Amino acid sequence: MYCFMVQDNKLGRERLSSLIIIFCLFLTVLTSIGVNYLDVKVLNIELIDRELYTVITEKGNVNIHPDDVLRIERTYTKEAFTGESVELDKIYTDKGFVYLSSQAPYAELGQKLMNTVDYYGFPLWERSGVDWNSLTKYSYAVGTPAQQVPLLFFLLSLQYAALTIGGIALIVLVFPLRLGEEEWESSSAFAQGEEESNQEEQDELRQEVMKSLAK
């Protein structure tokens, strides 16, 4: 009876964890679609004045001054087919961030904008007094309409929550089930041993009764 109860609990926990994982995967895909839909692509960068740049996006133009730049991340990779080196940069400003590829037609002006504050081309440059926590409120693409920023942050938070809950459900699905199987096997072995010992006692008692009757 105990073995059946343990097995039923294991199957119930497995079903619940599986449903949670499927729901979290569906929610992650849905939020990813929403984030991609709200993403704003940069079309060009133009130099207006000596230190004033205009980032032309799908949703309009945004003027950026070197004083607006808060953080620069430079990464280097290679194309899978050609092996050509590609520089991928992320420029954080107080008006959002700009993704920049060295293969983009506006890469030269983007590099010029970065070099106005980061003269040495460090892999990571941050303005004094700026940390990652203060940059989270600017974690959206330049040109994103102000009314869409709260929705974008909501979708990102929902996506992170779904990934976290789904990961926990996966851990609960994998590891405790293995422990449950070991417990079930040990309890089955214990129950089987008890049954065998009871059977032996009954056989001995039966033999003694038969002996007494024979006398």
Image (cartoon, rainbow, N blue to C red):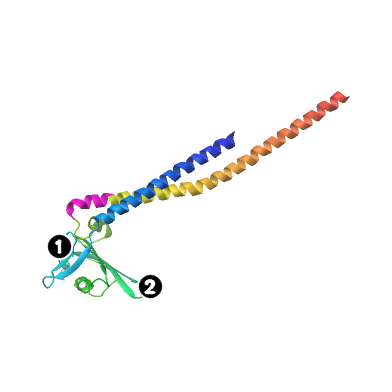
Residue mark closest to the camera, 1 vs 2:
2
Give the quarter of the figure containing the N terminus.
Answer: top right
Measured from the top left, where is residue 77 in percent x and y? 35, 71
Q: Please say if 8 is above or below 210.
A: below
User: Looking at this view, is 14 or 22 the one in front?
Assistant: 22
Measured from the top left, where is residue 146 in percent x and y? 17, 53
Q: Please say if 61 is above or below 156.
A: below
Q: Quadrant of residue 2?
A: top right
User: Which region shows up in magenta?
Assistant: 145-154
Instruction: Classify 10 Å Cα crowding around label 2: few (below 14), some (14-19), many (20 and above).
Output: few
Q: Relative to 47, is 181 on the left or the right?
A: right
User: Looking at this view, is 78 or 139 the one in front?
Assistant: 78
The residue at the point 31 percent across, 73 percent down is 86
Q: Please say if 6 is above or below 145.
A: above
Q: Is residue 158 visible?
A: yes
Say the numbered circle drawn on residue 81.
2
User: Looking at this view, is 59 or 174 the one in front?
Assistant: 59
The residue at the point 15 percent across, 60 percent down is 60
Q: Please say if 167 is above or below 93.
A: above
Q: Amino acid at mark 1?
A: Asn
Q: Quadrant of residue 138?
A: bottom left
Measured from the top left, where is residue 6 in percent x and y? 55, 38
> Could you tell me what secondary structure mostly forms the magenta stretch?
helix
Q: Quadrant of residue 66?
A: bottom left
The residue at the point 28 percent across, 56 percent down is 36
Q: Which residue is mark 1?
A: 61
Instruction: Classify 10 Å Cα crowding around label 1: few (below 14), some (14-19), many (20 and above).
Output: some
Q: Amino acid at mark 2?
A: Phe
Q: How far is disc 1 from disc 2 in space, using C-alphas? A: 34 Å
SS under mark 1:
strand
Q: Is residue 43 magenta?
A: no
User: Looking at this view, is 209 or 163 the one in front?
Assistant: 163
